[in-house]
Amino acid sequence: DQQVKQNSPSLSVQEGRISILNCDYTNSMFDYFLWYKKYPAEGPTFLISISSIKDKNEDGRFTVFLNKSAKHLSLHIVPSQPGDSAVYFCAASTNTGNQFYFGTGTSLTVIP
Amino acid sequence: DVKVTQSSRYLVKRTGEKVFLECVQDMDHENMFWYRQDPGLGLRLIYFSYDVKMKEKGDIPEGYSVSREKKERFSLILESASTNQTSMYLCASTHWTSGHKRTQYFGPGTRLLVL
């Protein structure tokens, strides 16, 4: 049973515009969330994270928003650049567990 | 910088062969993980290890085994490779902490083709 879901397999945006990637989860015990970026033929690289005690975390062009009541998080990329074209995975974990649970990924294409 | 390395980037094997995928991390991390990535299915956890000689099954352990004899090394073994094990295999490691700064660091991946 998929505990972390990314319902949009793909997304296309124009360069300079905002990219919004969404992620939903079902397990209320999750308290730490991460976003990873993955280029073809490479391993995922960590992008940004957020703890459940916050509702927003920002790092440069990347902002993650967490809505605990809706069990929803989103990644905003502003402005989007062609180099942002990649697959983005969200992941979640609990404070006491060793495991990370990943979504199925969203393939972002930024059109120049 | 954390470095996670995997023994091969690309591998071609025949059905029934025994396959070893090796992963090494240089940050003294306690936890190590093996995932496979398939289109539309995301990253699925095969096995993980939280200490030397310790292992836990993930979501899809069937057809796989693992070995952790040293802290820095975690091996994935396909006892008898089958075509449905053709996939991208990703190794990851993380430092265990009860706080909120846990991040998994991934290797570059091994793309395995079983013929």
Image: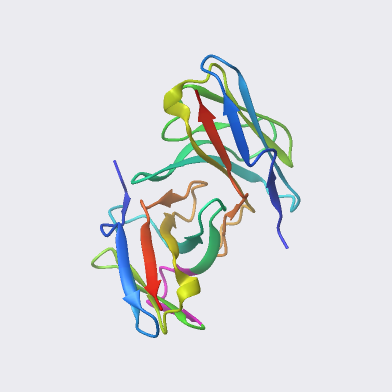
Nearer to the camera, A98 or A38: A38
User: Residue B43, how many percent across, how many down?
Assistant: 44, 46
Residue displayed at 45% across by 54% down: A93
Residue displayed at 41% across by 35% down: B59
Nearer to the camera, B34 or A92: B34
Range drawn in magenta: A49-59
Q: Does the magenta stretch include residue B18?
A: no
Using residue B71 as the reference point, say whether residue B36 is left or right of it: left
Residue A52, placed above or below residue B64: below
Nearer to the camera, B62 or B109: B109
Residue displayed at 57% across by 59% down: B103
Q: How many marks?
A: 0
User: Residue A44, how many percent across, how many down?
Assistant: 53, 56
Residue displayed at 29% across by 41% down: A1
Q: Can residue B28 be seen in this view?
A: yes
**Would you say the magenta stretch is mainly helix, strand or loop?**
strand
- Going by the picture, which residue comes out furthest to the left? A70
Residue A27, placed above or below residue A111: above
Using residue A83 as the reference point, say whether residue A11 is left or right of it: left
- Going by the picture, which residue comes out furthest to the top? B16
User: Residue B97, how many percent across, how many down?
Assistant: 60, 56
User: Residue A40, how many percent across, how many down?
Assistant: 51, 54
Q: Can residue A67 be seen in this view?
A: no
Residue A86 falls in image quadrant: bottom left
Colour setting:
rainbow
